[in-house]
Amino acid sequence: MQEFIQYVYDLELLWFHYLLIFIPIAIVYMAIKDVFFNKSQTIKHNFPVVGRLRYLLESIGPELRQYIVANNREELPFNRSQRSWIYASSKKENNYEGFGTDKDIYASGHIFINPSLFPYAIPEGHPNQKDPYFLPCAKVMGPHNGRKRPFRPYSVANISAMSFGSLSANALSALNKGALMAGCYHNTGEGGLSPYHSFGSDVIFHFGTGYFGVRDAKGNFDMQKLVELVQNNSFVRAIEIKLSQGAKPGKGGVLPAQKITKEIAEIRHIPRDKDALSPVNHTAFTNVPELLDFIERIAENTGLPVGFKSAVGKLEMWRELADRMVQTGKGPDFITIDGGEGGTGAAPHAFADHVSLPFTFAFTSVYKIFLERGLTDRVVFIGSGKLGFPASSLLGFAMGCDLINVAREAMLSIGCIQAQICHTNKCPAGVATQNKWLQSGLDPTLKSVRFYNYIRTLRKEILEIAHACNYEHPCQMTMHDVELVTGDTNLTNTLAENYGYEKATVAFPGMVELLNCPHLGGLATQKQPVVLT
């Protein structure tokens, strides 16, 4: 008996020794595999071995959440269901849900889209028979004001303003390459036109009060530099002036010093040892008449459509802008309305939480002003602020949007995990950081395909819902096609009843005419189709 016990003891000791040898070898093996051979999962690359715990916890998350944690619809700014839809869409996985919705459809603000008894039937030879993802803008930027190079965006869903500095080089490269494949435009953000915005997609060059990329030695706007930028980069299709953004209007911009690399400093012409601050006010103009003159000067010198982006608060200056557009016949070719719920790399809590109207209130307030003066056909209206989902996009189109810009949704599609530490330079997914190690885990080639899949899925589902309402294009959506749950009485109101206006009819000639438009950008301008590898 004693010998048997000794044998068992020796056997256990032997196995223990084997484990002492095997475990370190296994850890080293996993670390090497995560760092050098893993291309698809940024977290595992940046945090070898330990990063695997995230995926383990994620896999058992539904069971944990079902009993002790938040449900699928509780988290902000994007809940689990929203993130899961983006992740699945970007990977071309099953993005359906089973057993019915788990959303409280009686909750105030819930969106109902009214389908038709007879959905739109795609006829023979229609562009969407060959390409179910083809969905260009119904309007053209620039022709009303006589711009030399009008622009019709190939995609109704595009990338919102995100700068090199706020986002990493690899993240921007992934987005730009994905935009090239999907045919959508890429807004540069106010940090200037970087090499990572320049892989060939349509680009909207965006600048703010810092005039980064088009400034003189004193930090003032330099028209000649803008002209040279446009001449040297034929993919720049429009110019956007930033007046403010939804997350921090009236605050200016800030790029924390810890995110300023040598390359960023050279592109922006700023020092590396302190935060890069965009002033609160523009120096190129100070009021509405000067803004309109500034827009005209830029358009005359570049030949491009010119517009602006702004959050919404007080409406007096919006009324003045619309009145002067009526009086002069001049004005912006497009306007981007940024909701107060929009994202940012860094903003004070008070500004992010309380300053400026959220998208639905902001957009409807401004659109009504232009509608009352008969100006809606002269302007391409762009909406931004958590609109990167099919139902939210359709809400925007029904209110009067012509285009949708997405930012954080695009970030999620290339690996963002909503860690909400964009302002610290420690983004674990390598998206919103300048840390070389962290961003090395983000493979631009792979992630470009992820964004491409997401934006195409978004377009396809927008189009499918529009067809369910018996429309060929979402621009035909009306204020009566969408209803919102209101109050505690389980009543619904149409958008027209809620916001007190009827959307102007958009002149829509049909998809065939849009496909043949000489001003169509995106894939229509590419001599050869982009091949996915």
Image: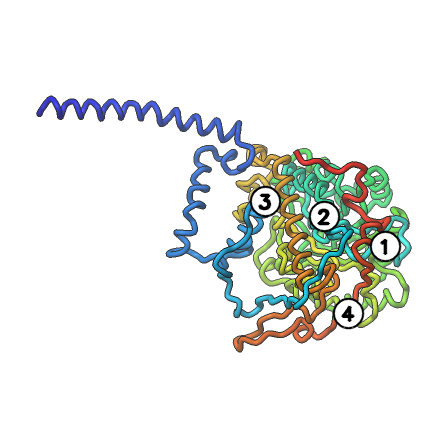
Which amino acid, by three-letter code, is at mark 3? Lys
| Dot in front, 4 or 3 | 3
- Camera-side residue of 147 and 105: 105
Residue farthest to the left, as pictured:
1
Which residue position holds label 4?
A: 369
- Camera-side residue of 56 and 317: 56
N-term mark: 1 or 2 = 2
N-term mark: 4 or 3 = 3
Which amino acid, by three-letter code, is at mark 1? Gly
N-term mark: 1 or 3 = 3
N-term mark: 4 or 1 = 1
* Residue drawn 69% across the image and 60% down it: 467
Which quadrant: the N terminus?
A: top left
Which residue position holds label 1?
A: 142
N-term mark: 3 or 2 = 3
Which residue position holds label 3?
A: 92
Q: Would you say 492 lies left or right of 21 here? A: right
Residue 409: x and y, percent? Answer: 61, 50
Which residue position holds label 2?
A: 131
Which amino acid, by three-letter code, is at mark 4? Ile
